[in-house]
């Protein structure tokens, strides 16, 4: 009963009892791991991330606080430490924290909720990317440079530069995940 009330399907009125508010079932967003091949899944998730993370970076550039910048910077420092020490798992966790900090800076709780949901897939994809990056010289440093470009644009309160940097990062992450060496140039517009 409590779950149905929380879902907005049941209501109560003193003296009248419990009644059905709505007979519509709430839908929830789901991603089924089994419905796509791994390479297809990577591309589809990257396309979804493209829209979410690109706009989140732009909004973060407009709305960020000093605390948001500090959270982003701490995460970036942890990513750098992990790259330097070769501790892949620590780098993945810090990478996810960086993206969550950007979403928190949007001041829109839906970005943070959705990114938390995507976190399970994001963690897995970043782990694959980091493991592949470790096998190829400078790939981890390239991803970190992309993060820094996003951070610098947010710091400068430049929404368009933040969106462009986030787009490049997600595109290049997709390339790293599919082990494709055709990366989007840092200077190229999005």
Image (cartoon, grey):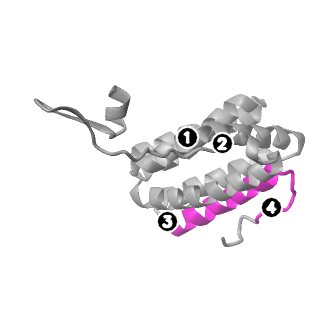
Compare marks 2 and 3 and give the one earlier in the sequence.
Answer: 2
> Tag 1, which secondary structure?
helix
Of tags 2 and 3, which is closer to the observer?
2
Compare marks 3 and 4 and give the one earlier in the sequence.
Answer: 3
| Disc 2: which residue | 122
On the rendered structure, is 7 left or right of 33? left
| Disc 1: which residue | 117
Quadrant containing the C terminus in the rendered view: bottom right
| Disc 3: which residue | 158
> Tag 2, which secondary structure?
helix
Of tags 1 and 2, which is closer to the observer?
1
Q: What segment is highlighted magenta in the picture?
A: 160-184
- Residue sitting nearer the eye, 31 or 104: 31
Q: What's the CA distance linking mark 4 and mark 2?
A: 19 Å
Label 1: how many residues lie within 10 Å, few (<14), some (14-19) or many (20+)?
some
Quadrant containing the N terminus in the rendered view: top left
- Rendered position, 94 above or below 102: above
Q: Is residue 170 magenta?
A: yes
| Disc 4: which residue | 183
């Amino acid at each position: 009963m409590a779950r149905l009330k929380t879902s907005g399907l049941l209501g109560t009125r003193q003296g009248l009892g419990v009644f059905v508010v709505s007979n519509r079932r709430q839908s929830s967003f789901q991603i089924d791991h089994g419905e796509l091949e791994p390479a297809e899944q990577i591309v589809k998730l990257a396309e979804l991330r493209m829209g979410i993370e690109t706009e989140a970076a732009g909004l973060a550039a407009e709305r960020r606080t000093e605390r948001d910048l500090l959270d982003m910077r701490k995460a970036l420092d942890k990513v750098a430490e992990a790259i330097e020490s070769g501790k892949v798992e620590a780098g993945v966790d810090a990478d996810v924290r960086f993206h969550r900090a950007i979403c928190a800076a949007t001041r829109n709780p839906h970005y943070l909720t959705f990114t938390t949901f995507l976190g399970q897939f994001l963690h897995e994809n970043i782990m694959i990317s980091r493991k592949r990056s470790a096998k190829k010289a400078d790939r981890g440093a390239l991803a970190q440079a992309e993060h820094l470009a996003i951070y610098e644009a947010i710091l400068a309160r430049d929404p368009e530069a933040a969106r462009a940097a986030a787009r490049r990062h997600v595109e290049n992450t997709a390339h790293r995940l599919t082990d494709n060496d055709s990366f989007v140039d840092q200077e190229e517009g999005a």
